[in-house]
Image: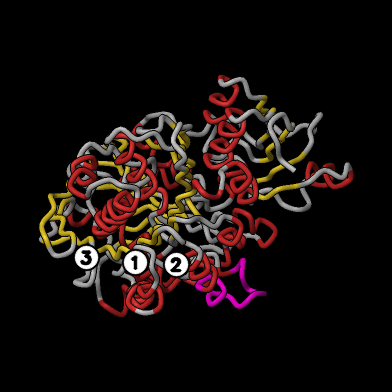
Amino acid sequence: MLKPGSRLHLLGIGGVGMSALAHVAARRGYVVSGSDAQPSPNLDRLRAAGIDARSPHGSLGACDLVARSPAVADTHPLVREAGRAGLPILSRAELLAALLPAPERVAVAGTHGKSTTTAMLAHILITVGRDPTVVLGANAPILGGGHRIGSEPIALFEACEGYGALDQTPAPIVCLGNVDDDHVEQFSSRGGFAAIVASFERLCTGAARGLALGVDDARLRAWSEDHLGGTDRPVWGFGLHASARVRGERCGPSECELHVDGRRAGRVRLWAPGAHNLRNALGAIATAGMLGVDPPDAALALSSFAGVSRRLQRLGQVGGALVLDDYAHHPSEVAAAIEAARSEWPAARLIAVFEPHLPSREQRLRERFATALAGADVIVVTPVHAGRERDRGQTEFGIADCLDRARAEAGRARQVIRAEGLDEAVSITRGLAQSEDVVLVMGTGGVSRVAHALVGCRSTHAGGIAQLSDSNRVNGR
């Protein structure tokens, strides 16, 4: 179906993940074009590379097949146009599988931390002189964007569980950091969370050349100790748990001692705080070990890792307060981001600005969101970003209502503020911020532009706060 010279049109090409695949396809001999709902720097970079990237959507033009972001609905006019023309229509995962040869793939999976772990692994390999291909769901300084074309037969990529994609992108080497209850709404007709767990297990079972498992996750610890540990392939448990083969000990906010097979092997020092980041680093070190990199060398390489966009990213200051931008959009991620900020700045007043994503997720997890957000001193909550559930409408402030109830029951003086929109969130937060505060902006919709507006710098997306590209309407990793 897909061969060099094929004319490929990508719908939602402006997203980090889709734009990365567009670059890879073009470098591998395909004639690439694409379109997105809004202009963005990603489109500018694609055009600079000679790719016909348009905004807004026009017509398909001359093409042999179409690939679409998960954000692009079946009812989209260009999807219908492709159907009428009899053109094959690939999902993002199917396109990735077509572009990355199966024997070369190294999949980084898990509900949380895929982008950071993949970028860390890429950084390790590049620093020690290796030359991998990388497809990332975020921008990273080591890549100068979200992708890299290498000469070695190693292709690192994020393996997202959404939309059943894990079954479309098997890999001989897999790093799985954790399993949590995200993307459940996409599996409602197939068994819900149990189906997600099963897809992760199939990915692990197919990892014939090596498997790294985050054993701080009780489920993955059981997999490591039971049936997966009995195979001939290497299985590397990583984490802070005593059973981990690649283990962090004596941890501080952003560093730990590295122990491998019970022996000290160096020290991990990171650019940002958080136990979740230490776990990501240990996963990258374990996976690099399966690719021939000694753990001490991998740990040393990470000391120069500069992070990933929107992962506790320090943007600047407003009113003397430090502003952090983070992609957290699940209760576990929100809790981890707040815990990390607390560990690095324990004396600061923490102001959390949160935009919930997807009505179904907000309704299903609002009590857990409220519990996670309660770790902040001041919480500013915006309306729900409907994303791919636009037709369902928005639910207003359910999380804030839960926080109000919890505050009343506990008798705490925590401040909960409802912002009617993102522009109001900017003005509210600007009025709150004081010297030595920390402002933590979280979410996956347009809320990143709140953080950028606070510090007076340009966001990664063109236009006003209300504008979103197709890719921003889903929760890519």
Dot 3 falls on a residue whose secondary structure is: loop
Amino acid type for the residue under numbered disc 2: Ile
Instruction: Please say whether residue 8 is visible from this viewpoint.
Output: yes
Circle nearer the viewer, 1 or 2:
1
Assess whether residue 319 is covered by the magenta stretch: no
Q: Residue at x 37, y 43 (%)?
A: 119
Stretch in magenta: 185-197
Q: Position of residue 344 (x, y in %)?
A: 17, 51
Q: Name the residue under label 2.
A: 399
Residue identified by numbered label 3? 240
Q: Is mark 1 on a helix, strand or loop?
A: helix
Residue type (three-letter) at the residue carrying disc 1:
Ala
Location of residue 92 with respect to 330 vertically, above or below: above
Tag 1 and tag 3, C-beta contact below 8 Å: no
Image depth: mark 2 or mark 3 in front: 3
Residue placed furthest toward the front: 232
- State the residue position of label 1: 372
